[in-house]
Image (tube, rainbow, N blue to C red):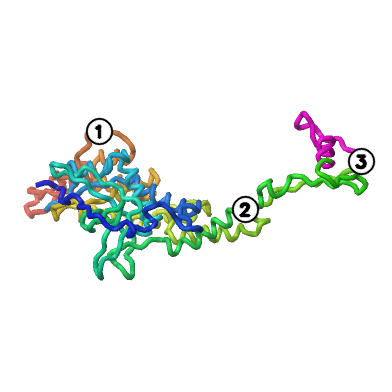
Amino acid sequence: MPLFSRRSAKKKKTDQTAVWFVESGRFPAGYYRLIDAPEVAACIDRITAIIAGATIAEFENTKKGDVRVRDALSRFVDFCPWPPMSTRSNWMSWVVSTLIGEGDGNAFCLPHIGFAGQLDGLEPMPDAAAVTDGENSYRVLWRGAEFHPDDVLHFRLFADLREPWLGRGYRASASAIAGSLLQASELKTNLTSPRYKPPLVVAVNSDTDLSTDEDREMFRSKYLEDDDSGKPWILPADFVKIDQIKPLTLTDLAIKDTMELDKRTAASIFGVPPFLLGLGSFSESEFNGFIRTTIVPICKSIEQELTAKLLVSPNRYFKFNRRHLFGYDLQTLINLDLAMADRGYLNGDEVREDAFLEPAGLTEFKVLENYIPIDMIGQQKKLVPDSGTGEGGYSNE
């Protein structure tokens, strides 16, 4: 039985006027994207990079627990969901950045089904628009065609309060901060630009006639220019006075504190630690809290949509590799692995994998004592009844 259950999307032509300005790529005057603000773009990029770099695998519920499934669909989703984008990392990067940024909590992908009933690709649908159709349903408009929600993958960030079948992103809360950061950046650029203030101011005594541009140019070429750069100027005493103007700093402009506050606010909105925006120092506990509260929920929503739309079996599901999301240093990770290996929860090759070493055939699960195989733990002498006592006791050997 094939794992690919979705039928090919049926396109139905719709009125072009219903496809808003979003699809045309033309925006009204004064409109800016969230990613146009560097600090906001940094928040989006940090979240995107972490999720796009995580492995996603297919699992199946069995009587002995959940086991990983390695089949064509699992490889397809984890390696190259859309061939023109080459890798899963690029594809996932588009999905996550669209969810957080311009998609405002929504990202759509169109499944392509081949003649054999297998999945050929999950095509990204940039600028797709979700339009409410009645009280409890919606349609997806993209490139002049209309799609039913079951025909597309609809990734959502948060549920919209009025239309819970649609997603809700950060635009409403982050747009004001993005605008403030853009204005502060533009102000800093303008006021520190040499175009608006020369590096030197030359004060000439009142007896010198410099009323015209020609006179000032002659004075500049005679006294202030030299064929060899770096030579000192030789000027008549008490003839001119030269003052140097230093570039303004953010402190001089009185916007340093405002920009820092806006950065912290942007980091708080997106759930990103401030040190990822250059504020403060790295904290492992803060980073792992960021993974638990921001990264994992986004991963969960993507997992559930892939599971609901791509898998037929009710016992199978997709899941990101949580272990590689958290920010453990190598020593902490290896110590954790060794503690689990001593109790028979990991084998040697699994520990070596986290240490970036090749497998060495250490596939047995052993427990602390004499590191015997786990299936022989009950054969230890100290657990075997001592027949010499006649009382059914246990040997201390």
- Label 1 Cα neighbours within 10 Å, binned few <14 / some 14-19 / many ≥20: few
Amino acid tagged 3: Ala
The residues bearing labels 1 and 3 have C-alpha atoms spaced at a distance of 84 Å
Looking at marks 1 and 2 on the same chain, the residue that comes earlier in the sequence is marked by: 2
- Is residue 295 part of the magenta span, yes or no? no
Amino acid tagged 2: Lys
Residue 369, position as x, y percentages in the image: 23, 45
Give the number of the disc on residue 188.
Answer: 2
Frontmost of labels 1 and 3 is: 3
- Residue at left 66%, top 50%? 192
Q: Quadrant of residue 53?
A: top left
Residue 347, position as x, y percentages in the image: 23, 42
Q: Is residue 379 visible?
A: yes
Question: In the shown orientation, is residue 131 left or right of residue 39?
Answer: left
Disc 1 target residue: 360
- Is residue 229 part of the magenta span, yes or no? yes
Looking at marks 3 and 2 on the same chain, the residue that comes earlier in the sequence is marked by: 2
User: Which residues fall within the magenta stretch?
Assistant: 215-238
The residues bearing labels 3 and 2 have C-alpha atoms spaced at a distance of 37 Å
- Label 2 Cα neighbours within 10 Å, binned few <14 / some 14-19 / many ≥20: some
Amino acid tagged 1: Ala
Q: Are marks 1 and 2 in contact (CB under 8 Å)?
A: no
- Residue at left 87%, top 46%? 204
Q: Secondary structure at mark 3?
A: loop
Q: Is residue 370 visible?
A: no
Q: Secondary structure at mark 2?
A: helix
Q: Quadrant of residue 151?
A: bottom left
Q: Are marks 1 and 3 in contact (CB under 8 Å)?
A: no
